[in-house]
Amino acid sequence: MVHVAITGAAGNVGRALTDAFTDHELTRFTEVEQDDMDSVVLDITDREAFREALAARDVDVLIHLAANSSAYAEWDALTEPNLDGVYNAYEAAVAGDVSRVVYASSNHAVNEDDLEDPAEPETMTEGAPTVYPHTPPGPDSYYGITKVAGEAMGGYYARRHGLEVINVRIGWLMTEAELKETQEEPDTPYPEAAARFARAMWLSPRDCRDILRAAATSDVPDSPLVAHAVSRNDERYLSLTSTCRTLGYRPRDNSAEVL
C-alpha cells in the first residue's frame, strides 16, 4: 500500500482531497491542530522537523500544498513558506527516501501574457494565448515568481536525486456556488476580465481530487513533469492535452455548463 503524505491538508485544496486516498495509507500535515481532522502538526519552515516527520513515517509520495497562496502577497510574506518551505520539503523527501513529490504550483507561474490588467493577476484578456506545459514561465506576481522557483527546484531534485517530480499548476478551486458568485451582476465586485479569468481557471472539487490523485499514483513517462489542473472549461487557456495523456486525467466539469 502506498503511503501518501499531504502538507497543507487543512487548506482548500487539502480538504478537497478528503476522500481521494481512502485506499492508501494517508498522513495529513497541518500548521496547527485541527478539530475536524486527524493530522500531524508541522511547521514546514523547520527543516529538521520536516525531515524527522517524513523519515518517521516511511512516506512514498509527498503532496506539498502548504504555502502562502495569495497572488497579492508581498515578497516578505512569501519567502519563508514558498521558498524555504519548498526547499525543506525536497530535502526531507530525499532524506526520507520518498519516491515522488507532487508540488502544488499555480497558474500564476505562467499568466503574464494573458492578463487584462498587469496589476491584477486574476484578470484575463479576450483571446488569451494557449499555455502548454513546455511554455516558458511567465509569472504574474511575486507569488507566481515563487511558484516558478518551486518548479525549478523540483527539476533540480529530479535530475540530481532521481525523485519523481510532478509540478501541478492548479487553477482556481471553487464550488459551483462560488463560481457563480464571480459572475453575478450587478452586485458582483468582479469586472468582466476577472469573471472571464474565473471561468477559464475553474477547478471543481471533484476534478481537483482526480488530478491530484492521478499525480500521486499514475505511472509517469518522464520526470520532472508539468500538469495543468483546471476543469474542462470552454474558455480555458491552460492546455490539458499533455496532462490527460500522461496522467490519465479526465476532467468532468466545465464552467460553461454551470453558468
Image (cartoon, rainbow, N blue to C red):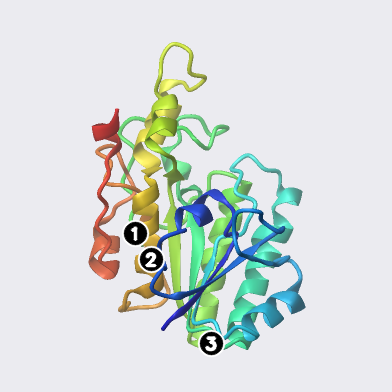
- The residue furthest front is 35
23 up-or-down from 111: above or below: below
Identified at 50% across, 48% down, the residue is 108
Q: Position of residue 259 (x, y in %)?
A: 29, 27
Looking at this view, is 35 or 142 the one in front?
A: 35
237 up-or-down from 149: above or below: above
Q: Residues within 10 Å of mark 2 (few under 14, many from 20)?
A: many
Identified by mark 2, the residue type is: Arg
Q: Position of residue 11 (x, y in %)?
A: 58, 52
Question: In the rendered structure, which disc, 1 or 3, sits on the residue that comes first in sequence?
Answer: 3
Identified at 61% across, 86% down, the residue is 96
Residue 133 visible in this rendered orientation of the protein: no
Q: Which residue is mark 2?
A: 213
Identified at 27% across, 52% down, the residue is 251
Q: Which residue is mark 1?
A: 210
Q: Residues within 10 Å of mark 1 (few under 14, many from 20)?
A: many
Q: Which SS class for mark 1? A: helix
Q: Which residue is mark 3?
A: 161
Spatial separation of the CA atoms under disc 3 and disc 2: 23 Å
Asked which quadrant contains residue 240, the reply is: bottom left
**Would you say 167 lies left or right of 90 here?**
left
